[in-house]
Image (spheres, rainbow, N blue to C red):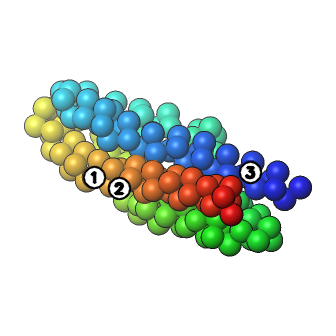
Amino acid sequence: MLSGLAITAIAVALLLLGAMAGVFFAYSNSVVPGLDAADPRQAVPAMQSINRTILNPAFFTVFIGGPIAAAAAALLLLPLGHGAAAAACGAGAVVYLLGAFAPTAAINVPLNNTIDAAAAPEGRDEAARVWAAFSPRWTRWNTVRAVASAIALLCVVLGGYLWAVG
């Protein structure tokens, strides 16, 4: 029974961590650069709309589900005698929490809140100032989240591999 639960937890972790790595990657490599190329009077309200839209149950499930599933896999693998596999899955959860979740809470969400609180800039110069205060830092930390999510994914892949060969 534990084996079936462990493989399910690994599969769920892989799916959700991969989804988050993809979301973060897409934002850093297409969404925000696309908004950077737009008139800042359009970029600011577009990002405000994106920030409101992404706050939904599906996103939250994927965002927090990956590290929970990775940690569950680690806990399920331990009593099966697969310490190295458990450690790799646990490392995936820790990497995600430190490299994706923590920056989200400490940096990206506060930046989102700041841009969300900005009144719709009337002039191009004011809009450009608001956008310039947001985009570079937000994108830099979002890229950190993408890399951390990908590393977390690789840790869980390693955990599954170690279990399979162990």
Image quadrant of residue 135?
A: top left
Quarter placement of the C terminus: bottom right
1 or 3: tag closer to the N-terminus: 3
- Please tell me whether mark 2 sits on a helix, a strand or a loop: helix
User: Could you tell me which residue is drawn at 66 percent across and 67 percent down?
Assistant: 86
The Cα–Cα distance between marks 3 and 2, rounded to whole angstroms, is 28 Å
The Cα–Cα distance between marks 1 and 3, rounded to whole angstroms, is 34 Å
Q: Nearer the viewer, mark 1 or mark 3?
A: 3
Look at label 1 and name its amino acid.
Arg
3 or 2: tag closer to the N-terminus: 3
In this view, 125 is above or below 10 = above
114 with respect to 7 (left or right): left
Can residue 155 be seen here? The reply is yes
136 with respect to 12 (left or right): left
Look at label 2 and name its amino acid.
Val
User: Could you tell me which residue is drawn at 60 percent across and 47 percent down?
Assistant: 14
**Residue ranking furthest to the right:** 1
Look at mark 2 in the image and give the residue it sits on.
144
Quarter placement of the N terminus: bottom right
- Please tell me whether mark 3 sits on a helix, a strand or a loop: helix
Q: Give the image location of residue 13, x and y in percent.
A: 63, 50
Q: Give the image location of residue 123, x and y in percent.
A: 14, 32
Look at mark 3 in the image and give the residue it sits on.
7
Can residue 120 be seen here? The reply is no
In this view, 120 is above or below 69 = above
Within 10 Å of disc 1 (Cα), the crowding (few <14, some 14-19, many 20+) is: few
Within 10 Å of disc 2 (Cα), the crowding (few <14, some 14-19, many 20+) is: some
- Please tell me whether mark 1 sits on a helix, a strand or a loop: helix
Within 10 Å of disc 3 (Cα), the crowding (few <14, some 14-19, many 20+) is: some
Look at label 3 and name its amino acid.
Ile
Look at mark 1 in the image and give the residue it sits on.
140
